[in-house]
Each structure stands twice: as structure tokens, then as C-alpha cells.
Image (cartoon, helix red, strand yellow):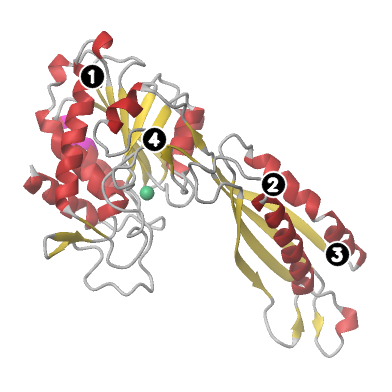
Amino acid sequence: MTNDIVDILDALIGVPTTHNHPVTGIASLLASRAEDAGAHVESIESSPGKQNVIARFGPKGTDGLVISGHMDVVPTDGQPWTSDPYALTERDGILYGRGTADMKGFIATITALLPQLPVADFKRELVLIWTHDEEIGCVGSGKLATAYTDPLPSQAWIGEPTGFLPCRMHPGHTTVSIRCTGRAAHSSKPGLGFNAIHVASRVVAQLETLASTWRSQNRFSEHLASPFTVMNIGQIHGGTAVNIVPDQCTIRVGLRPLPGDQAIERVAEITDCLNAVRQHARFGGGEIAIDVDQIAPALLTPSGTALERALCAHSPHSEATGVPFATDGGNFQEMGIASLVFGPGAIDVAHKADEHIDPKELVQCGRVAADLIHRFCVTSASDA
Ligand SMILES: [Zn+2]
């Protein structure tokens, strides 16, 4: 079992599936492994080189189980890796490589299990959903939420690295771009221009005030370390030369609306808080434009589901809590699927140099998966 997992993980890690590369190489590998194990597989292309893989085992219906993970990884640029991040490397019994924890280790574990599945005995459906471009805003699952209409099982297990902590909620993530426009001029005659960076600085001040208002509106404090809508002013880009009055400055802001909040309402608050700055900009011949680049919905699965009970049986924790990061679960919720996030590895090593996982955790994850598939797909409905 361990060897199978490591062999598959080695193949997955070897393909750098960052957002600027195709995911096709590992999508076709995972599709053919699932087909070999008896699945009906759909590889649904969202754009050239980008597809979601949906592998369906057993009789169709809404009672079974979805198991899901994302095939993409975050880039390694500028990170001080000890070994090649795209070559699975073992040191002192630990596996290193981009995606070992987040979350190719999980995908390899489930794929290694497939040949042993008693598919002929399935009474309810098992569906594997491997998505693309989760890391840039849950893009692949967002495509499914708008375009995939076949009924799916109503519960999903998403194997993000939580160190086997079951989680039933997380904030969403929304990216907003605020483009400030001014009027260019030679810097020796500033009166002929209108400085877009000055406008942007007023925007930042207003956003900071709004963010502190949001920080005082706490909910879910028993489940989330930051129990409010987090705002991160993450990027600012403006001007072309030190002797030109800049006519452009763009600020990119990331929001993490809490479960139950509508992202678009938070964006409306941003628009409202910038009214005075907009008036000021227009008076000077400038403008402020606000664009929503991406929305990944929050997740809130009710407590006490059958999947929560099944996962807690494999965890030192007796009930599910929250994670601070967004997952595909928000989009699955839009599709009527209640998701739990639970998996091997630590989120603290993900996205960093020398990302790693202990293969013993992958073996443990394989045992959890075998038990869950048996409970949800093989035993009779009344036993589940
Ligand atoms: Zn992830």
C-alpha cells in the first residue's frame, strides 16, 4: 500500500500544476486509474489544459459519498527549497515536494486504494472529484457549480491538510481590484496633473477604517481564530517613473467573508466607504473603479451529519470545527453538497519551502478512506 501511494505521489509531484501550467498530465493519469478500477469517468474541460475529473463508481444517487481534492499547487518561485520541489524526495522517512501536504498526498492515497474497492458490492455511489485551480480562487469547482447538473451524493469529504481535524466551516475568499485613475503630467508642473497614487492612499485609509469595523463584528469565535471578515490589502501598483505624475494606481484587496455573509454585500460596503474619495477624485478629473475578480463562497455545513460522525471516529476530536482558509467546499455547498474538510498533513507546511508529509499519515488516511467508503457505499442505507 505505502509503495503504491509513493509511486503515484511521485508521478503527481513531477508535474508542476501551478496555475500557469496545464493540469492535463495528472488529470489523465487520475482518470485512467479510476477507469481501470471500474469508474465511469468524465474529464470536463474548463479551458485549454484545465479540466476537472469526475469519476463515478456504483449506482447513481444522492446517498453516497463524494471524495474531493484539488490537483493544482502554488508556485515555488523565490522559496529556499533544500531539494527539487518537483521531484518527490525522502529524507529521514519524510516525503518532501510541492503538493505533498496540499494536497497531492491525499489524492495519491485515494487513487492507490481504488484497485481494492469492492465496486460490485456498492449499494450507493462513490464519486471522486479532482479539481483544477483551487489555489487561485476555487476556479475549477466554481465551473462545476455553474455547469454540472447531474445529481451527486449530498455529502463530500475534502482531504485538505488539517492534521485529521474535522472541519465543517470556513470563510470564503473574494478578490477586489480598485483602479484609481488620475491625469499624467511632467512632475515639474504638478498642477497640470492629478496624482492617482494620492487617490490610492486615501482609498487605503478608508479601507483600513472599514477593516477595523469588520474586526469588531465577531461571529463563530469558538471555531475560527479570526472570527470576522478579514481584509488584506495585498497588492498596490502605480506610476511609471519618479518624474511623472502617475495617472494609474491599482490596489488589490482580499476579503474573507464569514459563513452566512454574502461576499457581494461586503463589496457593496467597500463601494460605499469610498464614496467621499470618489467625489474627491472626480473633482480632480480622476475616477475610482471597483471590480470583483473572484468569489469563492464560504462553507457552513450543519453539525451532526453522518459524515461528521464517521470522520470524528478517526480523529481525537469529538466534533467538527472551522478552518481559516477557503476550499472547494463553498462551491460544493452551492451544488447542494454538504462538505467536511479533513486530511493528512499540516496546513502550516503548505505553500512554503520544503513542504512535506509523513507517509505514515497517508497510510492512516488510506484506512480512514477504506472505512468511509465501506460505510457510505457498501453497507445498507440503514447502517450508514
Ligand atoms: Zn489546498
**Residue 54 showing in the rendered view:** no
Residue 99 at what x, y percent from top left? 29, 55
In the image, the residue with mark 3 has its CB under 8 Å from the nearest atom of ligand 1:
no
Is 242 drawn above or below residue 379 in the view shown? below
User: Contact, CB < 8 Å: mark 2 with mark 4?
Assistant: no
Q: Secondary structure at mark 2?
A: helix
* The residue stretch that appears in magenta: 31-35
Give the residue drawn at x 37%, y 60%.
Answer: 351
Q: State left or right for residue 105 relative to residue 190.
A: left
Would you name the residue on which mark 4 appears? 320
Q: Residues within 10 Å of mark 4 (few under 14, many from 20)?
A: many
Q: Going from the N terminus, do you reach mark 2 or mark 4 first?
A: 2
Would you name the residue on which mark 1 appears? 377
Would you name the residue on which mark 2 appears? 267
Distance between the Cα atoms at labels 3 and 2? Answer: 20 Å
Give the residue drawn at x 60%, y 47%.
Answer: 228
Distance between the Cα atoms at labels 1 and 4? Answer: 22 Å
Q: Quadrant of residue 268?
A: top right
Most foreground residue, 86 or 224:
224
Q: Secondary structure at mark 4?
A: loop
Quadrant containing the N terminus is top left
Q: Residues within 10 Å of mark 1 (few under 14, many from 20)?
A: many
Residue 281's label in the rendered image is 3
